[in-house]
Amino acid sequence: MKQIFFLLLALGLFSCSRQNEKITVLQNRIDSLQNKLQWYQSSEHLSQALLWFQHSPEMHALYVQGYNTAKQALACNLKNKQYKEKKNAVVVDIDETILNNGLYDGWLYFSGKAYSDSSWNAWGQDAIAEPLPGTVDFLNFAKDLGCEVFYVSNRKQNPLFEPTLQNLKKFNLPFADEKHLLLKTDTDKTPAGKTTKEKRRLRIENELNYEILLLCGDQMADFDDAFDIISGGTEEQIKDSINTYKEKFGSRFIILPNPVYCDWLDQIVKGGDRNNSVAHLDSLRKAKVERWKN
């Protein structure tokens, strides 16, 4: 009788154990599906921007149009130089202005991660970003007109100077050398502690004795310190500063499209919020979208 009792007990315990294992497996599957759903919901906005940037003919056409405009503006500005004794310079940003970082953004999307300095530096050190449409043609056009090109980027001097230079040289871009590549250092800060390119632009004009005839970039701070306010101003202040300089867009400032990231995202969407989790950023974006109140 005891043997039968212990046999039934063992069978019951085994059955419970198998049942618990099934429940654990089922719960793990549910957790995995919930994580995938959360990733999809919080990252799907990026897929739309990336598909447009990587594949749309409109993106290609806008870059070609932007650099065609840049050619016309540069030729006109060269004829109307203010400082005849100074050398001629064109200042360009690098990321999403000259080089295409769509593969890095695609990696962020598929990994469900937000931007980080460590992953960005790893991408930059691979030195595999390719030139955007119209860039090589425009840069060589500027060189043929007697202008030197300065690459002024907020990539960090350390550790990205050498791999960035290597990336530019890979495509035989003109003036890809130590003199003409000006990356961000710890001194490139506004009084409020925000990153600025103004010191590097002033160095080109004053210390190196060039007249900057044209600037190309994908965000407002690439053009003038008046737009550094974007890192700390309201939407109204930002638009006011743009209206003040509206005559310069298309003549001195050439703005290029970037739907994936830029200062507008940090300021308009995030403000002073430093929580970079993908889900949190998604909630901030949705809170800012204006909608039809039907």
Image (spheres, grey):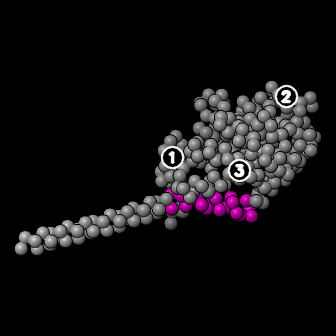
Residues 182 and 23: in front is 23
- Asked if residue 215 shows in the view, the reply is no
Instruction: Locate the N terminus and report the quarter of the image it occupies.
Output: bottom left
* Residue 51 painted magenta: yes
* Number of residues whose C-alpha sits closer than 10 Å to that of mark 3, classed few (under 14), some (14–19) or many (20 or more): some
Q: Which residue is mark 1?
A: 276
- Magenta stretch? 40-59
Q: Are marks 3 and 2 in contact (CB under 8 Å)?
A: no
Q: Tag 2: residue type?
A: Asn
Rendering quarter of residue 12: bottom left
Residues 77 and 278: in front is 278
Q: Residue at x 62, y 43 (%)?
A: 121
- Asked if residue 205 shows in the view, the reply is yes
Task: Specify which label sits upstream in the sequence, 3 or 2.
Answer: 3
Question: In the drawing, does residue 221 fall left or right of residue 288?
Answer: right
* Residue 232 painted magenta: no
Rendering quarter of residue 179: top right
- Mark on residue 84? none
Q: Residue at x 83, y 50 (%)?
A: 136
Q: Looking at the image, is 105 positioned above or below residue 182?
A: below
Q: Tag 1: residue type?
A: Asn
Q: Which residue is mark 3?
A: 128
Q: Are marks 1 and 2 in contact (CB under 8 Å)?
A: no
Picture coordinates of residue 170, whole percent (x, y) = 78, 47
Q: Mainly helix, strand or loop, the magenta region?
A: helix
- Mark on residue 209? 2
Q: Residue furthest top?
A: 207
User: Which of labels 3 and 1 is toward the front?
Assistant: 3
